[in-house]
Amino acid sequence: MKSNLVLIPKLIVNPSNMVFYNEVRWDPFRPSRQKINIFKDVDIETDSKFLKSARKSEGNVSINAKRKLSKAIDYLITTSHDQTVYERISGKNVIFKIAFITLTLPSKQIHSDKEIIEKCLNSFLIEIKKAYHVANYVWRAEKQKNGNVHFHLLINKFISWSELRDRWNRITNKLGYVDRYRDFLIEWHQAGFKVRTDLLKNWDLQAQRLAFQKGKTNDFRSPNSTDIHGTKKIKNIIKYVTKYLTKNEKTENSTQPSESEFDNSTGRIWGCNRELSNITGYQCEIDTETADQIDRVIKSGACRTYKSTYFTVFTIEWHDLAKHGAEHLFKYFSDYLFDKFGYSEQLSIV
């Protein structure tokens, strides 16, 4: 029996866009003659092969990987509630939604990037999952100007800066990085405070002296190896973080060398948890009702449209679907977020 090619119009709804495309089917069904390999992600703490997955490269994020990473960031931030948390050190309540963290090595890197990822970053992720119930996360590895690998991490759980630093320093010292940091400073300041002239451009004399005095109080065993970036004043946090974590090029003022300077054993330069990695978005076949809703959104002028040969992207925030005539799509996507992440705008986390 001869098979006929049938094109099924379909729609995918994501937090920041809708994607229209035609799904190819054969009627009656005809198996594909091409071998299709489907890569399935697993959590890095449950399978070491995850670090050797298809997400490795010469340090650059490929176009497809950038799309997947961007989608993971979009869903992570979208499904994060504003929270009021008590900050123990300051004794104040703070409003919190997203933690954008940088993790650096306390001293000169002497292990491969891959080993740092496996033994330090992986251990850190396992611990914060257990200690702080971190379920969703996205991370990206980069090179510092000094050649050390460092990591940007995005989570939606509050961790005080002191607990974060203590935990990361303890983990990196399994490979001796805090001990080597301490040994260097003790030798450098053996006759008393000695300025680091090579750092004066970005670290003035007064700041260095204060750091020396503070370091003496803890025997130089608490290096400033972590940083929590402030995000309160950023208007579009999704756009900002996505651009930051998916960049490849070296800008004129950047302190980062080319990502291609990663050693070949890196394995992976970014990652996220299984739920974010496998996210597909709300999908449906386009019937008359759905087509009418898409048409109303387009005519409202609320979205930008990008057309390619095989698909069309409508850029619009999902919150805006209902007020521009797509009430049902708004409801279906809201249900999708609740089903996948337990997220509802009617819920609040205190």
Image (cartoon, grey):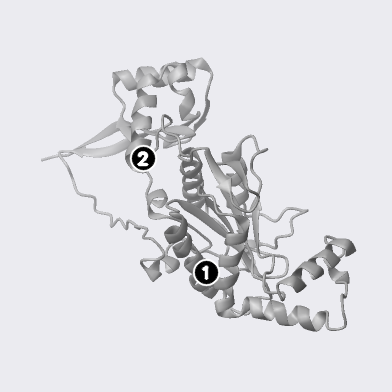
Q: CA distance from mark 1 to mark 2?
A: 30 Å
Residue reaching furthest to the left: 1
Residue reaching furthest to the front: 91
Q: Nearer the viewer, residue 329 or 344?
A: 344
Q: Where is residue 96, by image quadrant?
A: top right
Q: Looking at the picture, does residue 341 appear above or below residue 333?
A: below
**Any mark on residue 188, and which?**
none
- Residue 179 image position (x, y, % from top left): 65, 80
Is 119 on the left-hand or right-hand side of 332? Answer: right
Q: Looking at the picture, does residue 242 appear above or below residue 150?
A: above
Residue depicted at 46% across the width and 17% down the height? 324
The answer to whether one can see residue 204 in this image is no
The answer to whether one can see residue 218 in this image is yes
Label 1 crowding class (10 Å Cα cut-off): few <14, some 14-19, many 20+? many
Q: Where is residue 105, by image quadrant?
A: bottom right
Residue depicted at 78% across the width and 53% down the height? 253
Q: Looking at the picture, does residue 173 appear above or below residue 308?
A: below
Q: Which residue is mark 2?
A: 342
